Image: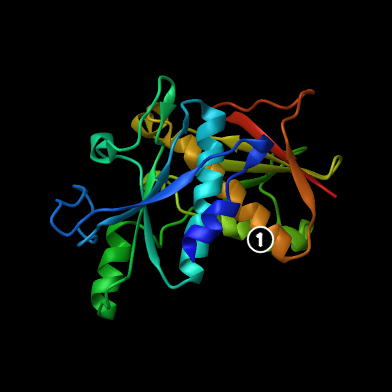
Amino acid sequence: MLEDFLSTNRTGIAGEAVDFVIVEKNETEKPLKLDYGIIKGNKTYLLGKTNSTPSSRLNYGYLLEKAVLKATDMNLATCWIGAFDKEYFNGIQLENGVTIPGILVVGYAAKKSSLQDNLIRISIKAAKRKPWNQLFFDYETILPLEKERIPQYAEPLEMIRLAPSSGNTQPWRIFYSTATNEFHFYKRPTNKSYEAAGMHDVDMGIAMCHFELASAKNGLEGKWTVSTGNIKSFDGLQYISTWKCK
């Protein structure tokens, strides 16, 4: 049951907790208005609330993406929604400084023809992910990171490359340091409206979720930390977090 998973998926990065709920709307109620023509009959939503800070929104994305992957494993279809009418969920009280960074629409996927499926994928740019050499770099040389350098982490990094993001903007940039055996995660804001709404912070949490789970699947241990030392700065990038490999 998805509810059982949510009860155990409360605590995320740095021990910050989020309580998620499944909201079921009645058939007689109007569905949430969405700018997604491919979603119809939506009446089940998964969401929570958290502090309106970059780190809390990141943590929210990290935890809610775990729910996405669990739902997928249960043959449920989901869709991240970042822009929506918060008044629609007026049963959830939002205190000052608290927000709902995003929601999931949950349901069952309708059968589609291959042509229709291809058209949908084209329309949402699902097949247009940035190539490896635009996302992953060597921390010391700043050159694109070659897969042969870190073959054990090729799959976790690929899972980042394929991760969903607001507008498919992929705002993450990851630098691997050979000297310290660490991956440094940076955010590259690529859309002003998404960044202003905090959606790129959620995106970073999604990327970190994919990386951590794929690392665990491959027996690669590590932990998240925020470097307090001399971390390099790069034009247009904001340092977010570090994965310390064990």
Residue type of the residue flagged with mark 1? Ala
User: Residue shown at 23%/73% (left/top)?
Assistant: 116
211 vs 223: above or below: below
Question: Seen in the image, is 178 located left or right of residue 206?
Answer: right
Q: Which percent across, then down, holds residue 9?
A: 58, 51
How many numbered discs sit on the rendered protein? 1
Q: Which percent across, then down, holds residue 157?
A: 64, 55
Question: Seen in the image, is 166 located left or right of residue 26?
Answer: right
Determine if residue 162 is in view. no
Q: Which percent across, then down, holds residue 25?
A: 24, 53
Q: Which percent across, then down, holds residue 92?
A: 35, 36
**Front residue (pair 235, 115):** 115
Q: Secondary structure under badge 1?
A: helix
User: Residue shown at 31%/71% (left/top)?
Assistant: 109
Q: Which residue is mark 1?
A: 214
User: Residue shown at 63%/28% (left/top)?
Assistant: 234
101 vs 159: above or below: above
